[in-house]
Amino acid sequence: MLNGLYDSKKNYKNLIGGDWLFATDNANLKIFSPIDGSLIGTVPAMSCEDIDYAMNVAKKSQNLWQETPMYMRAEYLYRAADLLKEYKQVISHVITMEIAKDKASAESEVERTVDFLRYTADIGKSLEGTSVYGENFPGGSRDKLSYITREPLGTVLAISPFNYPVNLSVSKIAPALMGGNTVVLKPPSQGGISALYLALVFKEAGLPDGVLNTVTGSGSEIGDYLITHPNIDFINFTGSTAIGHHIAKTCGMIPIMLELGGKDAAIILDDCNLDYAAEQCVAGAFSYSGQRCTAVKRILVIESIADQFVALLKEKTLKLKSGSPHEDVSIVPLINDKSADYVFGLIENAVSKGAEVITGGTRNDKLISPTVLDYVTTDMEVAWEEPFGPILPIIRVKNIDEAISIANRSEYGLQSSVFTSDIGKAFTIARKLEVGTVQINNKTERGPDHFPFLGVKSSGMGTQGIKYSIEAMTRHKAIVVNLAAPCNKKR
Ligand code: NAP
Ligand code: G3H
């Protein structure tokens, strides 16, 4: 399996034009495990010249790929899915080492990606064009017919975040490929090795050389060069709102898709099944230590039931296991010290302003205990900031209107949950929430992956989800025929 991916010292290589390559000047980034600080390996720190090479290869390969029939494009994805499934243990172990994702979640990331590949191949094959007569518009007639098909955009730059290095790379690569595009993948630095294993899977699946290429290196150094590269026809980015804003400002007329940060609220009404809602909120807030864009990041609970609900949250949170990601735990060390410092700072800020620590509030290096904070008020940073860590702030509200108002005051608009037994009330609230998705009686979460997935406000631009992603990375092409022209008339 590992042929060419790395050398005897675990210096990993990029896949460009079907070859495994170091940076031409051999520069690299050392990748240490957040679990124990051990060196996992290095990834190349690509130079501008290396990037030019990858971009040129991607551009040159696109025409042939565009001409590859849809069923064959799908075959490569099915093969990649089979191989990814076969390599599940190896790749999920790399994910665990590299981003400290617990074993079960790392395996589930790989399994979900296998399903994603297969479904994308299926959907790609089922896409059809349309046609329309000119008669619908005043003065038009059936003499004119427009055939509308979908065409590739060209070369897609896919930039993925650390928290799903395999899945959120495939969620861009697979729809782009089915749309007939070639891809340059810039994976996260921490998570880059996992993504290079993914590239290996595509290579072994027989994907033609140059159709998928990878460029590793620090985003802060090569990011601007990548996003302004003239060979790029679309940027598909998942990551922080700060970098998303920067990309939107910098990349000019290149179309983009952005999936960014969130501050997802769970609104708890007095008529819901409290035990079930608490179970959902704890799972939603703390899996992978809250390092998910869709984690439940604040609770807005009606004050008449707040004491009861907080007690249930406490009971369930205390059952969570913390520790080594190799074990059966949900609370794991955060990705780096900076992140842990930030998360702990939010806890300290809240406590200094009067929040009550219900569980947790302690730290051992990068491992922060799952922290439920009650009596959080809107003057505390934790009420608005995205922690990307294991904190669940509770804001007690007087009524539904106050809950909606606080939910909508956030700069973010990814998802919200509403827990109630009154479905009519749930729909009324859902319509008023300024988010991409409202979950009724369910924790906030992406997926299943054929659902549309989108953020509004500072949470993103454009819609992901398998069919939607293929649509976003293709454009309409209309061919209009004038059936009444002399050359088209029957003799
Ligand atoms: P990040 O720091 O924004 O990094 C994301 C990617 O952008 C990485 O590959 C990074 O490379 C690259 N990058 C950094 N600077 C760049 C630049 N100037 N130009 C182009 N690319 C650049 O985010 P993260 O810490 O990996 O992920 C956590 C954030 O992502 C959270 O805010 C989370 O909410 C969000 N997220 C959102 C979704 C969603 O679907 N809405 C999903 C997952 C995560 P380096 O690693 O080399 O810096
Ligand atoms: O981190 C952001 C991901 O898109 C969240 O996906 O809800 O399946 O964990 P998830």
Image (cartoon, rainbow, N blue to C red):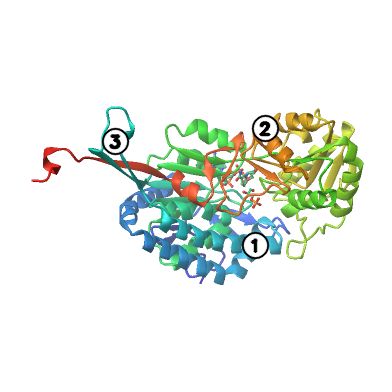
**In-image side of 17 versus 27 (left or right):** left
Question: 10 Å neighbourhood of mark 2: few (<14), some, or many (≥20)?
Answer: some
First of labels 3, 1 by sequence position: 1
Q: Amino acid at mark 1?
A: Ser
Can residue 52 be seen at all in this image of the molecule?
Answer: no
What residue sits right under mark 3 in the picture? 134
| Nearest to viewer (mark 3 / mark 1) | 3
Q: Residue at x 75, y 30 (%)?
A: 406
Numbered circle sitting on residue 476: none
SS for tag 1? Answer: helix
Q: Amino acid at mark 3?
A: Gly
**In-image side of 181 versus 419 (left or right):** left
Q: State if disc 1 and disc 3 touch (CB < 8 Å).
A: no
Question: 10 Å neighbourhood of mark 1: few (<14), some, or many (≥20)?
Answer: some
Q: Residue at x 88, y 50 (%)?
A: 312
Q: Amino acid at mark 2?
A: Lys
What residue sits right under mark 2 in the picture? 432
Q: State if disc 3 and disc 2 touch (CB < 8 Å).
A: no
| Nearest to viewer (mark 2 / mark 3) | 3
What residue sits right under mark 1 in the picture? 108
Q: Position of residue 61 (x, y in %)?
A: 34, 54
| Nearest to viewer (mark 2 / mark 1) | 2
Can residue 192 be seen at all in this image of the molecule?
Answer: yes
- The CA distance from mark 2 to mark 1 is 34 Å
SS for tag 3? Answer: helix
